[in-house]
Image (cartoon, rainbow, N blue to C red):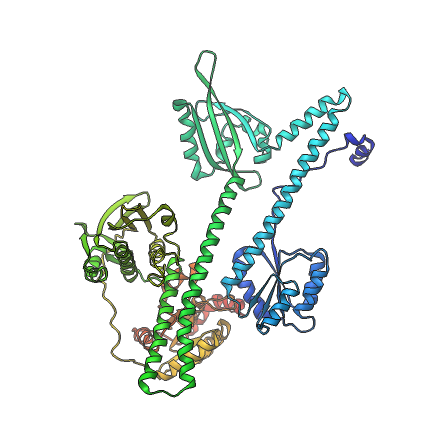
Amino acid sequence: MTRAAKASSLPSWRAEPPAPPDLDRPIIARILIVDDDERNAFAAVQALEELGHELVTAKSGEEALKRLLTEEFAVILLDLHMPGMDGYETAEFIRSRKRTARTPIVFLTAIFRDEAHVFQAYSAGAVDVVFKPVDPFILKSKVQVLVDLYMRTEEVKLQAAYQQWLLDEHDRVKAEKAQAERALRITEARQEAILKTLPIVIHSRRIEPPFAPLFVSDAVEDITGFPASRFVDDPTFGSSRIHPDDLQMVVDRVSNTARIGHYSVEFRWLCADGQYRILQDQGVLAPSEDGEAREIFGVILDATDRKQLEEQLAQARKMEAVGQLTGGVAHDFNNLLTVVLGNIDMLGRKTEDEARRARRIDAIRQATERGRDLTRQLLAFSRRQHLSPVSLDVNALIADFTPLIRQAVGEAVTLEVKLADQSLCAHVDPTQLETALLNLAVNSRDAMPNGGVLSITTSGETDAGGDRVVIEVGDTGVGMSAEVRERVFEPFFTTKEVGKGSGLGLSQVYGFVRQSEGEVRLDTAPDQGTRFQLRLPASDAPAEVVRAEEPPPEVQGGTERILLVEDDPTVLALTLDMLIGLGYAATTATHAAEALEIIRSDAPIDLLFTDVVMPGGISGVELARTARGLRPGLPVLLTSGFMGEGAVLETAEFPLLDKPYETAALAAKLRKVLDRPARRTRRSPEAKARAKADETSTIAAAE
């Protein structure tokens, strides 16, 4: 008789109980991107892929509806303007089906920006409207909120199903207890099974190392995936699966039980499914009849869910900081853009004398430079800025920079500088270090409105991370409350009056030090002053003499032939004008595959000038390496406005010109690269043979 037949032949109260919902089943969030333009769809995918969710694209409303018949999605990104079935009609079909009626729809549009169309979009069931070109940060933030809502809803459903299962089990057990006495043993067994679902493991172990388990309750299998016998039969099994970074801590805590009578420790344990779970183990000494301790009794709890809740709380705080960051960026950039657009409008609409025209151009330049500085400060906080570190004597740099700090803090503040007797070398960017010191000094000045003492000291220390150069900047100011201290490094967070501070000074300090593999420590309290410690890794290399680069006396061009690679058409056109204006002959390409075709040809090229971040799967760094393989010695100059964390390190092998750049900066950088001695720009047969294998794989990826 089959199992199903046996179950059907039993009385209803003896039917096999249903299996509980699988709480470990991963919840997958899928995002549907509907856009007939592959470039827009690709841009959306690029913006969202780091969220780690499954991204699905559809080229039309019809294709999207077909997928929705059989697939479930957390969010739908829907283009309004599509041939055939447009976004409104597609949304109407989606909302008409019970299964997809509540799926969030975010409309994407580059055309319908007026209020009437926006109202129509919301009437059609959209939860939001995003205008093209899509800002990746904004799109990612909006989608993440909707995906988080979906995943939390699914988690709630799963937990509700589990709770209902527990209730149903409880009711069923109560019904069975009302049956005949012969069913009593079955009822008790089922009650025990319910207790096993609780994430609690009772155990006992020996007091001597290696603290071999004597007893482990069966509930351990629900948490770890291994039966209790596995732990008892093999005394070293439990400790062998503790995370290596946590093992010594666990051994130390349990070892102390004989001395203090109890222990409590939290550690990561590798379960049968290959995943680490966080276990909390607490135990006490169990004395025998003669009063001597013979055993340790303990309880193990699965603390993974609690940790996840703590991480969710941290994520909520992070989202608050993101909102603050977004508002600050919008405020500052809108002010800058108002200056730029207003002056451009006045220049285009009326004829003015040369002096007024020059003032407007200067205002545009200043606003643009402020925007560039703001971008660099944000990149510093996120540790994505391009650094130019050198091995420098920190004492010498501070000594040379002290007059500027003294001027910045004013006469009301007494500046005390105490430098270590020994030479202190660190491998850092000198400009960013000076900026960090200036930001700290200005903050200290503002914290001492009635004057006070600003102290800067240096010392050498050794900690767990190795030798450190410690720079301490302290003041006798008003100090900070605990609430302010928690948020002091957040970008755009400031306690100063409106217009008195951007809120980016300390975020620059934090980002620069962390990117330099250092640490920032803060000691402060209300009315007790503030002390910042910049703890930078020490360097064994000899100190270099740091000299500020003098600007060239005049813009110097050339007649060399330059291959310009840039995917943004407006930047490409502007840079081409700059190069031609400097006298260079320029050939252009908009992506790596096109550039490689030119490099493989016999076209004369004296320098490759390429953007770092480009579409097509090949970065400017990879293009430069392949180009060097094809034409050994070919000079390369990279440029970028933003790079990912890995690219910041990759670009170190080639000279880099940060965006935005002016003609003078471009001219100086080109001459510096071109005037380096001994370069080969033509391919030899041997070079072709050596580069062939690498070239084949790179070109295949580009095409």
Of residues 228 and 501, the one nearer the viewer is 501
Q: Residue furthest left?
A: 421
On screen, residue 262 above or below 525: above
Q: Residue at x 32, y 86 (%)?
A: 354
Classify residue 445 as left or right of residue 135. Answer: left
On screen, residue 580 above or below 314: below
Place of residue 13 in the rendered image (x, y in percent of width and height, measured from the top left): 77, 30
Q: Quadrant of the C terminus?
A: bottom right
Q: Residue furthest top?
A: 290
Residue 562 placement: quadrant: bottom left
Of residues 608 and 661, the one nearer the viewer is 661
Total labels: the figure holds 0
Q: Residue at x 71, y 55 (%)?
A: 99
On screen, residue 215 above or below 142: above
Place of residue 494 in the rendered image (x, y in percent of width and height, measured from the top left): 36, 56
Classify residue 323 as left or right of residue 9. Answer: left
Residue 602 placement: quadrant: bottom left
Q: Is residue 114 visible?
A: yes
Place of residue 671 in the rendered image (x, y in percent of width and height, measured from the top left): 31, 76
Q: Is residue 686 visible?
A: no
Residue 493 placement: quadrant: bottom left
Of residues 311 and 474, the one nearer the viewer is 474
Place of residue 371 in the rendered image (x, y in percent of width and height, measured from the top left): 38, 69
Q: Quadrant of the N terminus?
A: top right
